[in-house]
Amino acid sequence: MDNQTLPQIQTVGVVGCGLMGSGIVEVCARAGYQVVVSEVSQEALHAGLGRLRQSLDKGLSRGKLSQEDHAATLDRVRGTTDLEDFAACDLVIEAVLENLEAKRQIFRRLDEICPWHSILASNTSSISITKIAAATDRPEKVIGAHFFNPVPVMPLLELVRGLQTSEESYQALRAFGERLDKRIVVALKDNPGFIVNLLFVPYGLDAIRGLEQGVASMEDFDTAMKLGMNHPMGPFELMDFVGLDTMLFIAEAMYEETKDPRYAAPPRLRQMVAAGMMGRKSGRGFYDYRAKG
Ligand code: CAA
């Protein structure tokens, strides 16, 4: 499709300014888009924008952007606690907690607020795009845009086509992703886990099962995959990084859809989440991060 005929994206809305949302805001604003980002409260917004500033500071200190780009990026970002402020957005990317009902409510509201040409995307890692899209009167303009943490560093954008996503919406998101300088892969089907988690979830769960069975220590599992396969993090380090609650949620969503035992969460994962051991974000997961602060 000719880029000239695609819907022009100038202003991007991001719903949620958590770890993923703030990263998405950063890459969009750095690519020159005007960005509106929403949170549920002023406190959450303040924390999210603080995270954005911190990441830009890190980029500056690492020589990834200039002082001028740092200032210009922040200038392009506007925070709000009111979804009505998305009324001028050509694209909105939702990045809230993984909960189908919460997402459907947000999409229903966005469908009422946003202009008819706007594309509505979800950063979900496991929920069916088709089910989210069904909450709107524009399912052809609903698509999955799955980013990876840390968003400014990870080069991948996984696009997911729902059952009714149009070719035009898909091509518009492709052009958008390329402007963000991301490499794009596309899940042609709205299958549980899309591409990345179809592989990553059974891999992580198998590592836990291996640990439960006493195959090796978690340190040796991690070392094996880092030094033997050249992965930047081993499976336990990576699951701690992703968040064990997120890992459990994704596994359960995939199991629910498929009943495939590969996605059944091992007892150890359930117990750790019940105990509040969520990984890095809670200070403790497979590893203990509390000493490092
Ligand atoms: N802005 C711009 N650049 C930044 C940056 C920022 N805020 N923070 C770091 N960088 C750059 C650094 O300058 C560095 O660049 P160079 O290599 O050019 O010097 C690079 O990013 C790496 O940064 P660090 O040196 O600080 O960190 P590291 O080498 O220890 O790597 C890591 C950290 C990138 C997290 C690495 O360990 C890694 O790739 N881990 C795996 C991450 C992963 O797999 N993420 C996906 C999780 S799955 C998910 O998100 C979705 C899901 O559905 C489960």
Image: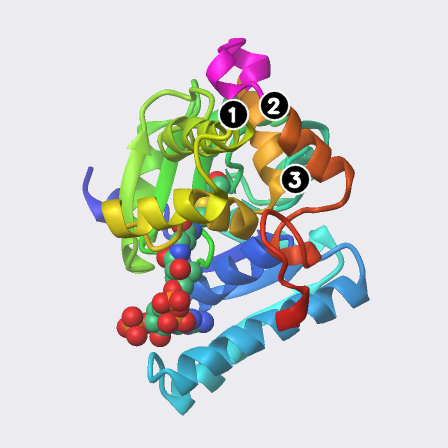
Position of residue 289 in the picture relative to residue 260 (left or right): right
Would you say the residues marked 2 and 1 are in contact, meaning their CB atoms lie under 8 Å apart? Answer: no
The residue sitting at 49% across, 82% down in the picture is 57
64 above or below 147? Answer: below
Lateral position of residue 31 relative to residue 249, left or right: left
Residue under label 3, please give it.
245
Residue closest to the eye, 134 or 288? 288
The reply to whether callout 3 and callout 1 are in contact (CB within 8 Å) is no
Q: Nearer the viewer, residue 35 or 59?
A: 59
Residue 249 can be seen, yes or no: yes
Cα separation between marks 3 and 2: 10 Å
Give the SS element for disc 1.
loop
Which residue occupies 53% across, 24% down? 128
Residue range highlighted in magenta:
255-264
**Disc ID at residue 213:** 1
Place of residue 194 in the rendered image (x, y in percent of width and height, measured from the top left): 40, 28
